[in-house]
Amino acid sequence: MALGTIRKLGPLLLCTAMVTPALAQDGVPDERLGGEPAVTITLRPDLAQAAGNRRGAFEGWGTALAWFANVTGGWPDAERNRLADLFYGRADGGEEGLGWTIARYNIGGGNAQDSAPYLRTGAAVPGFWAKPKGATGRDWWNPEDPAQWNWQADANQRWWLDAIRQRVKAPIFEAFSNSPPWFMTVSGRVSGADKATDDNLRPGMEGAFAEYLARVVDELQKRHHIVFRTLSPMNEPNTDYWHATNTQEGSHWSPQRQSTMIEASDAALRRHGLATKVAASDETNSHLFLRDWAGWSPAARAKVGQLNVHSYGTVHQTAVRDIATASGIPLWMSENDTPLPGDPETFTGMASPLAFAEHVVLDLKRLEPTAWVFWQAVETLSGGNGKPSSNWGLVKADMASSARGPHPIHVTGKYWAMAQFSRYIRPGDRLVPVDDMDTAGALSADGERLVMVHVNAGLSPRNLVVPKGWRVSMIVTDASRHAACLAGTRVPARAIATLVLTKGDAKAPCT
């Protein structure tokens, strides 16, 4: 394999004297070596509800660029293009990529030039402002002065805008902000206020910050020949995550300040003649999103063109779904990554891929979003930034090494778990309710392709019974297969299976 980091397991030899079950890499019995008896599960997708789905068509999958793009966009061409192909390459099987269509571009705030570096690797995303010589204090910024803009900033992350545009026929770009520039903050730092529950935008600066964001959106659209469909001015705003000594950009916003910022952002976008809509609130989970929504004014709600919520918590997800449905506003699951807690870093183990896939299934079933967006597609190898061993990210690399490289690229099992979804549930499909908690479904616009992704985290194989009248292909990821076709509908233990049911002229993936 070109990457040299994923190895299919060869035949496993059994010892006839063995009396205890063999263990897979994640420490559970491996059904290939004599696990539990199979069970049968009947899958009943509600195709009629898909046809009348008021939530709209699914728009696709993607990632936030931000930190990993701020690093990898400066790598040698062969390496950064390999990464772009892995994520935004075609979605027709094999090693063509994940077929993502969405990217969230992070508009950096930027600390003062004389600040000692303290943010984690990649997190110091440059701002586009330029401080005039001799300026002091925090009130010098004049957006009407061309000399106070630096459009050469953030070249690495901007490389990804061009790379995605070249690979995706109709990409969807969203701009998002983690923090205002340092001179607009109370603490003078982009990592948050001195107290984590205090708002860090200086009072009355909503208009200035909105102008900063709108001008960046306008300029980057022109320079990169793209369209930012949405702008999200706040990220996880109503949390206690963001404080001045944190190692990433972040800013607290009370619901009332969120409301003011939503209106200011919309006004700035309209003033510049942009079609970009405001997305909000990118809250960390659904129950905090409900607090945000409850605190927004009717005027602010009317200016929101897209609802964004993260899924770092799964309670009250259907309540957010109901808000989106009742208000007629599209809903994105705009950020998540789910490694299994305590699972040590592994490129081949299945514990974290299974946990991740279960999480995606539940998001699709409970939130019913029109898009699902990953956090950081590339994460640094464990031990970087003082982090303990973990399975964050889909691809691992040494993010702290020299930009000149080389940079070995490690594709993990979570990458293949994502492939089980993004290669087969495609833009234009409509999510379909399925009466099994481990299965998410989607139906193509013409009704001739039905996709069901099933997660079997248990020790028993599962015989899946599917509706009659369809041709069936099954694609499986487990400890020995990476999005590989497998005959029949028997799902191995500890596996993720995608069933592609077709009829008429619909193309089947395993023929």
Image (cartoon, rainbow, N blue to C red):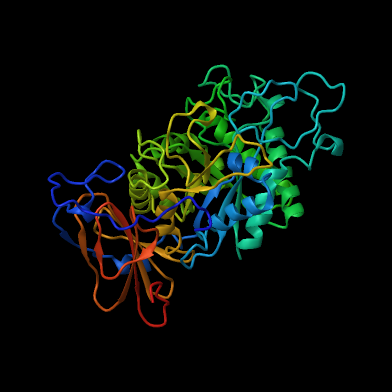
Which x, y percent locates residue 476? 34, 61
Q: In the image, what residue occupies the spot 63% across and 55% down?
A: 81
Q: What residue do we see at 42% from left, 49% from top?
A: 414
Q: Is residue 232 visible?
A: no
The image quadrant of residue 213 is top right
Residue at position x 24%, y 57% in the image: 436
Q: Residue furthest bottom?
A: 504
Q: Is residue 80 left or right of residue 132?
A: left
Figure quadrant of the C terminus: bottom left
- Most distant residue in the top direction: 194
* Residue at 76% over, 48% down: 219
Q: Position of residue 389 (x, y in %)?
A: 43, 32
Residue toward you, 358 or 300: 358
Q: Quadrant of residue 200?
A: top right
Residue 237, position in %: x, y? 52, 32
Task: Point out residue 178 in the picture as x, y percentages from the top left corner.
Answer: 59, 35
Q: Image check: 401 left or right of 144?
A: left
